[in-house]
Image (tube, helix red, strand yellow):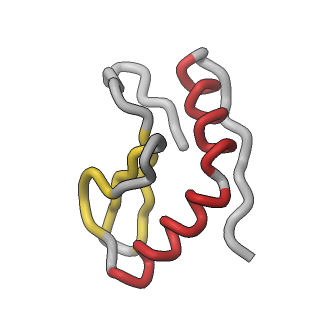
Amino acid sequence: MYAEPDTPHHKPHFHAYYQDHVGIYSLDTLELIGGRLPRRQQRLVEAWAELRQAELLADWQRLQQGRRPIPIKPLD
């Protein structure tokens, strides 16, 4: 998760990258709200986000306060 200081963000979200693909996911519902990932990678991202939703939301808040996010563990 990275801050984009000059870009207004109205809805908490994160971007997931795989090769040339990018998926944008809502933090509230963990739904794909933009972009596209291959189906297998989409399922992995959704599983990871479900397990780490509280951490993702905490990092979003940190970014909104101008602080650095805390790294979040990948799926094992």
As drawn, 67 above or below 15: above
Q: Residue at x 49, y 31 (%)?
A: 3
59 sits to left or right of 31: right
41 sits to left or right of 10: right
Q: In which quarter of the image is the C terminus?
A: bottom right
Total count of labels: 0
Q: Residue at x 36, y 31 (%)?
A: 11
Residue 31's quadrant in the figure? bottom left
Residue 70's quadrant in the figure? top right
**Camera-nearest residue between 30 and 7:** 30
Where residue 13 appears, as percent x and y from the top left, is: 42, 41
Of all residues, the one furthest to the front in this rendering is 29
As drawn, 36 above or below 67: below
59 sits to left or right of 42: right
Of all residues, the one furthest to the top in this rendering is 65
Q: Which residue is drawn at 52% across and 38% down?
A: 2
As drawn, 35 above or below 37: above
Q: Quadrant of the N terminus?
A: top right
Q: Which residue is drawn at 66% across and 54% down?
A: 52
Where residue 58 appears, as percent x and y from the top left, is: 66, 33
**Camera-nearest residue between 54 and 8:** 54
Where residue 29 appears, as percent x and y from the top left, is: 42, 48
